Amino acid sequence: LVFGDVSNGAAMDIQQLTQMARSMVTRYGMSEKMGPLQFGQQDELVFLGRDLAEQRDYSEEVAEEIDGEVHQLVDSAYARVRKLLSDNIAKLHGVANALLERETLSAEEFEEVFSAA
């Protein structure tokens, strides 16, 4: 937002966002289009070095619909966050400057900086 592009430091955040959106659609039934259904079976495969593996039990068409819903959730969240940050750009700069000065902020320090901006 500030520099006009997405930094590669956000890679882990993007990965977590994508996993969360996919879980919302496939595990928790939180998609209006797909309905309150669970897609994919969770299998424990600890012996293969993984905690869980997902076995796909749905068609390619359903997989494409799931991908579309995941994209919609991610795109919607991205737009909301950009608007929220744009609407509060002074607060963003205030917190960023405080972090540059002190490196870490306690909850009280954060509140003080956030409310002052």
Image (tube, grey):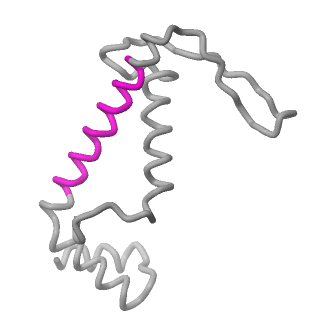
Q: In this view, does 52 lie to the left or right of 81?
A: right
Q: Is residue 18 above or below residue 99?
A: above
Residue 65 point in image, percent of width and height: 38, 17
Position of the N terminus, as image quadrant, is: bottom left
Residue at point 53% right, 15% down? 39
Magenta part of the chain: 65-84
Indicate the quadrant where residue 61 lies: top left
Position of the C terminus, as image quadrant, is: bottom left
Residue at point 37% right, 82% down? 99
Residue at the limit of the structure toward the bottom, as seen here: 101
Q: In this view, does 1 lie above or below 13?
A: below
Q: In this view, does 34 lie above or below 111?
A: above
In terms of depth relative to the viewer, which is nearer, 9 or 61? 61
Residue 75 point in image, percent of width and height: 28, 39
Is residue 109 in the magenta section? no
What number of labels is visible?
0
Q: Is residue 90 left or right of residue 38?
A: left
Magenta portion: prevailing SS class: helix
In terms of depth relative to the viewer, which is nearer, 17 or 56? 56
Residue at point 40% right, 72% down? 107
Q: Is residue 61 left or right of residue 90?
A: right
In terms of depth relative to the viewer, which is nearer, 109 or 73? 73
Indicate the quadrant where residue 95 lies: bottom left
Residue at point 29% right, 42% down? 77
Residue 36 point in image, percent of width and height: 42, 12
Indicate the quadrant where residue 43 lies: top right
Residue 87 point in image, percent of width and height: 12, 60
Residue at the limit of the structure toward the right, as seen here: 47
